[in-house]
């Protein structure tokens, strides 16, 4: 790590966190907690100027050839800084045609293009690739609820990845292999872990603190001329690998393939590869139905039952995300917002009802719901169930 990179990292882990926390406390103490403009202006300027000074040195150094890990980490630090400027309204894509933060944009575009990812901070910077020092990982603030959110997100993501890994290992064995039963059970265990972490998040996270002090750092912002949607806990390939390998979502479905295209550059390059790989594999659901003439064989009953259990859990977790987490922490508190602040709520940018509809579609696909507006795998799952009844 170069000296400039190291100094910027030290600032991101210390003064930057302290200043964001101070501002959050000021906003939160107001009657209208959504008001940002005109509050804590000196501190905002201090974040802007101190960060900019580090960035000017980094741009001048021009050295992104430090190996993937370091360059990706630097992009994350830069992204945290830009997301904080967005949060404190020192930039707002709705009123600008290009980012007013030219040096930061130049550095972001330089690093991101060389890595093959978006030039903004992504979920992995704060979750799976958030390197802790002396027991503390990176964050925007030192608020308890931000750490709760980050830590349960990270555990949930790692558990989803564990489920995806188990399912991927079935491919070279085939669905009738005795060891595939163990792998299906491993995937089910991992999804039970996701469910458990989601339950903890649901009960322990404070709704107002999350809504007013954590979520605003996940808004879209511009880098150069382009606006990039906000990060969300879904920006890793594991969840889509599970969707595709189970056969609950299809890469040739126009709705779902659009989602994959939009997501690709928000995930890490090795995730991009494994996602592409899964897109060309025959789903386990189809493999089982291909073998329906063996439905009375013990292997079929055993593995199909284990498979259906994994599907049921994947659906339950998706329903939990939409009906509990999104409902309690986003939809609920949005009700009391005025029009101006409501338009800025979602991380991906579209208006809340549009976003909710999209999340509902994903929930239905994963649930293989029978009564959905969209085409799900309900009929195929019902056929499989009947075969082993
Ligand atoms: C306070 C808790 C959470 C809330 C309020 C929340 C809310 C949201 C929202 C609103 C989106 C849509 C993207 C956007 O904001 O524009 C989203 C996407 C997503 N979130 Fe969460 N989320 C939470 C926690 C989690 C956790 C713990 C996970 C899993 C580890 C997760 C997984 C996903 C996934 C996979 C997506 C992408 C869409 C999909 O494939 O389902 N979320 N989340």
Image (spheres, rainbow, N blue to C red):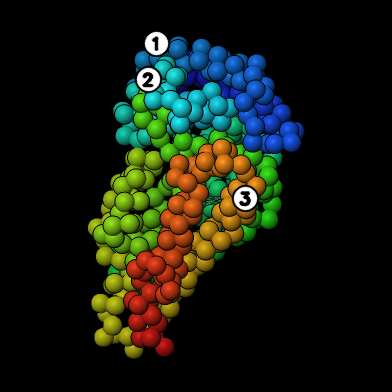
Label 2: state its secondary structure: helix
Q: Which badge, 3 or 1, comes first in the chain's sequence?
A: 1
Q: Mark 2 points at which residue?
A: 106
Q: Position of residue 185 (x, y in %)?
A: 47, 69
Q: Tell me: 376 left or right of 215.
A: left
Q: How far apart are marks 3 and 1 (CA)?
A: 47 Å
Q: Tell me: 338 left or right of 103.
A: right
Mark 2: few/some/many CA within 10 Å (<14, 14-19, 20+): some
Q: Do the residues labelled 3 and 2 touch (CB within 8 Å)?
A: no
Figure check: 208 above or below 318: above
Q: Where is residue 110 in the image (x, y as percent from the top left)?
A: 34, 23
Residue that protrudes farthest toward the front in the picture: 339
Q: Which residue is drawn at 33% across and 31% down?
A: 115
Mark 1: few/some/many CA within 10 Å (<14, 14-19, 20+): few
Q: How far apart are marks 3 and 2 (CA)?
A: 38 Å
Label 1: state its secondary structure: helix
Res. 335 in view: yes
The image quarter containing residue 36 is top right
Nearer mark to the viewer, of 3 and 1? 3
Q: Where is residue 254 in the image (x, y as percent from the top left)?
A: 28, 57
Q: How far apart are marks 1 and 2 (CA)?
A: 11 Å
Q: Which badge, 3 or 2, comes first in the chain's sequence?
A: 2
Q: Mark 1 points at which residue?
A: 60
As rendered, which of 85 and 92 lies closer to the eye?
92
Q: Where is residue 43 in the image (x, y as percent from the top left)?
A: 65, 19
Res. 111 in view: no
Q: Name the residue under label 3.
A: 335
Figure check: 319 above or below 2: below
Q: Residue at x 43, y 32 (%)?
A: 120
Figure check: 273 above or below 70: below
Whether the residue under disc 3 has CB within 8 Å of ligand 1 = no
| Quadrant of the snapshot with the C terminus | bottom left
């Amino acid at each position: 790590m170069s000296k400039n990179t190291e100094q910027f990292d030290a600032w991101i882990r210390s003064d930057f966190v302290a200043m964001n926390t101070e501002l959050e406390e000021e906003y939160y103490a107001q009657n209208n907690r959504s008001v940002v403009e005109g509050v804590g202006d000196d501190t905002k300027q201090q974040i802007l100027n101190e960060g900019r000074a580090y960035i000017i040195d980094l741009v001048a150094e021009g050295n992104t050839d430090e190996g993937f890990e370091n360059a990706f980490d630097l992009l994350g630090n830069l992204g945290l800084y830009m997301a904080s400027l967005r949060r404190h309204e020192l930039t707002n894509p709705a009123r600008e045609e290009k980012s007013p933060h030219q040096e930061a944009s130049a550095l972001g575009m330089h690093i991101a293009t060389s890595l093959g990812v978006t030039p903004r901070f992504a979920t992995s910077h704060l979750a799976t690739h958030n390197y802790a020092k002396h027991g503390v990982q990176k964050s925007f603030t030192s608020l308890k609820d931000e750490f709760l959110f980050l830590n349960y997100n990270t555990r949930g993501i790692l558990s989803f990845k564990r489920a995806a890994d188990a399912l991927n290992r079935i491919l070279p064995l085939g669905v009738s292999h005795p060891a595939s039963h163990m792998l299906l059970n491993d995937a089910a265990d991992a999804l039970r872990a996701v469910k458990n972490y989601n339950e903890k998040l649901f009960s322990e996270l404070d709704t107002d603190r999350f809504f007013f002090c954590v979520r605003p750092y996940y808004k879209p912002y511009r880098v150069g001329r382009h606006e990039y949607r906000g990060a969300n806990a879904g920006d890793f390939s594991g969840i889509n690998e599970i969707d595709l390998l189970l056969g609950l979502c299809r890469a040739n479905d126009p709705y779902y393939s659009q989602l994959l295209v939009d997501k690709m550059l928000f995930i890490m390059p090795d995730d991009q590869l494994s996602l592409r790989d899964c897109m060309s594999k025959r789903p386990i659901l189809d493999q089982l139905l291909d073998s329906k003439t063996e439905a009375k064989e013990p292997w079929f009953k055993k593995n199909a039952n284990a498979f259906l259990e994994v599907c049921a859990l994947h659906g339950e977790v998706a329903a939990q995300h939409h009906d509990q987490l999104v409902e309690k922490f986003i939809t609920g508190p949005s009700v009391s917002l005025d029009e101006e602040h409501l338009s800025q709520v979602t991380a991906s940018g579209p208006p809340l009802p549009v976003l909710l509809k999209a999340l509902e579609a994903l929930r239905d696909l994963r649930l293989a719901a029978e009564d959905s507006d969209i085409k799900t795998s309900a009929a195929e799952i019902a056929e499989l169930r009947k075969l082993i009844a």
